[in-house]
Each structure stands twice: as C-alpha cells, then as structure tokens.
Image: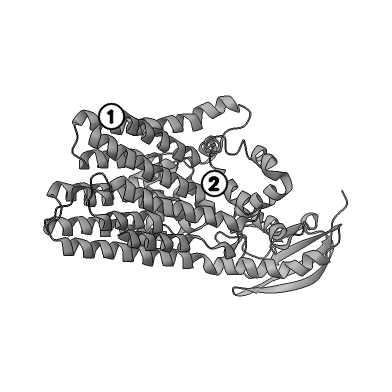
Amino acid sequence: MVVLLVLCCLVVFAAHFRPWEVAYLEEWPLARDWDTLGPLGFAANYLHWTLSRPLHLIPTMLGLALGNGWPGMIFLVLAAVAVLQLLAVVWALRPVSRSAWLNIAVGMFLALHPLWPAGYLQRFLPAQTAALGLAFALGMLIRWLVNGRITWLIGGWVTLLAGLATYPGPALVAPLASLVLALAIPASWRRRMVTVVTVTAASALMTFYSLVVTKFISPDAPSYELGNIQHSAVSSVKQLVVLVGGTLRRDGSVVILGIAIVVLLAAILVLAAAIPRWSGALIAVAAIASPATTVVFFGNTGWLSDIDRISYVISLALVPPLMVWPLNRKESRPRLQGALAALLVALSGIGGLFGVLHWQPYIAAQHKLLTALGPIVREAGKDEIVSVVDRSGTLGFFPSFPEQYLGPASVVWNSDNTPVWLCFDASSALPSGASVCESKDTGTTLRLAGSVQLGKGTADIYIGKREKE
C-alpha cells in the first residue's frame, strides 16, 4: 500500500504542477506587483484587501518567492497542497479505518476534486489550502472522538480557524462535516455535541471577525466580504435557492451527477451489507444536504451564479459522507468494496483529467496573444500605448481574458512595462466591465502593428501616442 500511496501522490502532483501555463487571471497582477513592489511592498499593498481573510495570499506569496516573482512556481505550492490533502485524509481515517485502500480512495476524491475543475487553477490556491486545513482538522476531530484527548480538539479548532482565515468558503462545510463524523464514530453524546459546537464556533468566530471586527479595524473602507454584502447580497432565501438551483441546472450537471453517485454508492453498500443501514442513510442524507453549504456565498449574487464557487463547497461537503464508508465498513464483501473504491479512484482521475483539459483552450489563447504582443510592446516608444481591439468575441470574458488582467500579463510575459489596453468597437457586444475604444485610453494617431487570430475572428493590435494631459 505504501507503493500505491506514493503512485497516487505522484498522480496528484502531476495533475496540479503545470508551470508551463505560467499564470491565468489574478496571478498576473500579483506577479507584477511582487516584481515592482518587492515582498514587503506587496504585502503592504494587499493588506487591506485581505484584512477579512488575513492568510489569503500567504500560499501565493510562497509560490512567488520560490519563483523569484515568476508566477509559474505557484503551481508548485498548489501541487504540494493537493498531495497533502490526500495524505491528510489517509491520516485522518487511520485511527478507525484499517482499509488503507478505502482511505486512499476517499483521499483521491478530495485531492483530484473531479467535480471542481477550478481547483486546478492558481487563483483557487487559497481555497485549496482551506480544504487542506479542513482535512487535517477532521483528522484531529476523529482522534478526539475516539480517545477524548482535549489536545486533539484544540488542535482541530486552531487548524480549522487557520484554514478559514485563508479562505472562508468551508465555513458551512465544517459544521456539516463535524456532525457527520460525530454521528459516524462511536462516542459519547457529550463528546459528539462538543465536537459540533466547537467547529461551529470556529466558523462563527471567523465570520464575526470578517464582518464585524474588520469594520472597527478599518472603519473608512469595508472589508472584502462586507463590501460585497453591502452592495450585492441576496435579498431573500427564495432568491438564494433560485440562484443556486439555476447555476446547478445551467453549469452543474457534473456536480448533480456526483451527488447522485454518492447516494447510489450508499445504497449499494447497504444492500451488500458492507456498511450498516444507518451509515448508508447518513451518507445519503449528507450528500443530498451538501448544496446547503452554498449559503456561505450569500454576500454576492454573482458568487451564487459562479459554478466554480458553488462546486467547490459542494465537492468539499461530499468528502465527509465518503469518509463514513471506511469509518463504518464491515468485513463482508471485501472484493466488492475494493472494486467500488477502485471505481471511485478512476472516476476521480477521469474528472481530474477533464478538469485540467477544460482550461487549456483559454490558456492557449492567452499565450498566443501575449506572444504576439512581445515585439509590438518593444517597438512602442516611451510615450506610446499598445491597444488590443478584439473583434473575435473571445477576449474580455471570463474564462478567456478579462480586461483588467491583459496589461499586467503583458508586463510579466514580455518583461516590458509598455501599457497595454483591451477595448472593443462600439458595434461589438461588450463583455461585463469592458470598455469601448476611446482616444483617452488608446491614444491618438493609431497605427496597426499586428493581428492575432482568436476564435472566430481577429484581435487587432495598435500602437498610439498618449494624449497629453
């Protein structure tokens, strides 16, 4: 099993370590600012933005430090976190489960996150780190439930809090997970209640800090979370349900299928007498309840329409129900259980492969445009600006190349500080937040310097003289 675990770790590492992609979205301005401001200036620049989640950029900063400012090394941290997720689940289940194969299978589901393709992007490294914190915290809570040592309970609380301080997305997954594990593991009801209350308190404390304490620390400007709530929060439970349901129907067929597979797995295990009936019911109910964890994104209607965020919490919420299987397994039907575990690993691998492939066309288009910009930004003079006028219907949208990231991306990719602006003709369909080309942005006396074929059209690249203020 040691050899198998090592092989699984290598698979997980290889899936996440893709430095040749360099960067994708937020990493471009982060890398530019790291290079221009230095580590201390970088930290000071983003201090207010991360005030409500104080550890948010620590993993990304580690990657930038390892790469001396090159964002490709953020993938190394992402890969290390994913491998640690696998090992954390195996370690978490070890005190109760004696089936190393089942432990590895559940760990592979977390580490390869087949229902969450966005987990393969650097921008979700904080979310992955929070998931790692949750996995280790659950391992400590399992040990607390088994032997009652208070140090495990305290350690789990601190670890969970650190994860939520990196990314608060699991704030509702954690209480659900603690309830599932408390019911799955034989322990006194007092110990079970203490577990759930302690975990819920950690989530509540982090929420209180993000929404209330930060307001006193920085009264002149709201925190990231509070600012979103003030302007974009859902207005009712009905609106929240409609938004989440619409997102799942539109973009979440794989997530719905994943929930159904977990419920089906529970039914098969019960019918095969591989787990007790009550364990099967616990798995099924927890899986069906997993979409409720999306309530954590109530602060912005846009978040509830974003499948990347929705699938993150649902995928993470399916891990505790899957952990019930090795925790409550019987010795009967070992071949069937082994085959089902192998199927879980295979499905996780297939889902992970599709997750990586999903982003490749967008990343390739970015690289193509940035490479074409290289000689043009070097040609431009000090008083000139380079403008990309997209007529392909490709740029400006997520997940292609939102407007605010093109300029920093060119600086990092081409090692040239020439300003680069993305804009659109007035006759074009404008992406959200995009701009029509105006001389105050593109400069005057434009000259065509090149064109790039993207999608169904071209993006024309111009050099123009900056307007004098």
Q: Residue at x 42, y 43 (%)?
A: 133
Say if mark 2 contacts mark 1, CB within 8 Å.
Answer: no
CA distance separating discs 2 and 1: 31 Å
Quick one: 1 or 235, which is closer to the camera? 1
Element carrying mark 1: helix
Q: What's the amino acid at mark 2?
A: Pro
Name which quarter of the figure residue 261 lies in. bottom left
- Asked if one can make out residue 79 in the rendered structure from this viewpoint, the answer is yes
Q: Residue at x 38, y 63 (%)?
A: 7
Residue linked to disc 2: 59
Mark 2 packing: few (<14 Cα in 10 Å), some, or many (20+)?
many
In the rendering, at what x and y percent does residue 193 appear? Answer: 25, 30
Q: What's the amino acid at mark 1?
A: Val
Residue 250 horizontal side relative to residue 227, left or right: left
In the rendering, at what x and y percent does residue 42 appear? Answer: 67, 42
Element carrying mark 2: helix
Residue linked to disc 1: 194
For the image, the number of numbered tags is: 2
Give the mark nearer the N terminus: 2 vs 1: 2
Name which quarter of the figure residue 215 lies in. top right
Q: Is residue 453 above or below residue 402?
A: below
Mark 1 packing: few (<14 Cα in 10 Å), some, or many (20+)?
some
